[in-house]
Amino acid sequence: MTQRERLVFLTKHLIGESDRYNMIEIPSSEKELFMLYRSLVNLRMPNTIDEEYLRVEDEYLKNLIEENGITKVEDLTESEPDIFLWQGDITTLRCDAIVNAANSQMLGCFVPCHNCIDNCIHTFSGIRLRIKCAEIMKKQGHEEPTGSAKITSAYNLPCKYILHTVGPIVNGELTENNCIKLESCYRSCLELAEKHEIKSIAFCCISTGVFGFPQKEAAEIAVKAVRRYKSETKSNIKVIFNVFKNKDKIIYENILG
């Protein structure tokens, strides 16, 4: 199969899962076709699916990510010993683990083609990620507390694992509790990573998007939490602060090194 043939197969399969999609036609444009596929993936509930779909999805997503270009942690430059700053798409980073800024349901973003990191990670990892997260949450029996973390396979991403953490939501003025909870996100992820013998971990800018945490204060807490953890535990884990926006890159550059 070509990449387009794989994408058509996946999209048709997802359309066929629900009668409400009966009137949807396959777009001729590659971009529109991918947007339709992504929307269907984002909307899909964590139900089981047949092995043929998963096989084709694996082939499609792995090839797509490879085409987008993969960055290896070995190619990054240190800002401080074992601490790195990297601007780019976290779904294309090859390290041991990346961190997902999840919501308390831990099922990913259900908004079609939303540009949040939760949506991107679930889209490019594949639908097994939502299925696995649903299994974890069903077993847990309650929503994920703010400041804690869970671990899953990364499935089709270049990394090995995804650490899912729920950051604090800031409504109005920033509080001390917001800051304590955000620091707990970083600490929880680092402790969970070490427990699973993870040697390198990439943090996104937790809580600074729709969760409303001020970017500068969030970056200061992130760096402080990592420095403190490494100092207290003598850990050699490599930590990558991943940023996407230029503003965040400048903020971290002013804090690190």
Image (spheres, rainbow, N blue to C red):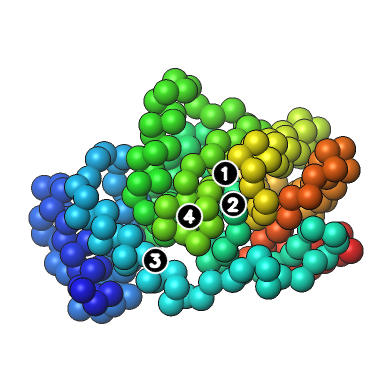
Relative to the observer, which residue lies in front, 141 or 227?
Answer: 227
Most foreground residue, 252 or 62: 62
Residue linked to disc 3: 62
Left or right: where does residue 240 sit relative to residue 110?
right
**Three-letter amino acid code at disc 2?**
Ala
Could you tell me which residue is drawn at 67 percent across and 54 percent down?
A: 200
Mark 4 and mark 1 in contact (Cβ < 8 Å)?
A: no
Q: CA distance from mark 1 to mark 4?
A: 11 Å
Q: Which residue is mark 1?
A: 163
Per the rendering, the mark at residue 121 is 4
From where the camera sits, is residue 203 visible? no
Q: Are marks 2 and 1 in contact (CB under 8 Å)?
A: yes
First-in-chain label (2 vs 3): 3
Instruction: Tell me the CA gap for discs 1 and 3.
Output: 20 Å
Q: Earlier in the sequence, mark 4 or mark 2?
A: 2
| Residue 97 disc label | 2
**Nearer the viewer's eye, disc 4 or disc 2?**
2
| Mark 2 or mark 1: whose residue is earlier in sequence | 2
Provide residue 115's location: percent of width, then percent of height. 49, 60
Quadrant for the N terminus, please.
bottom left
Real-space Cα separation, disc 2 to disc 1, in angstroms: 7 Å
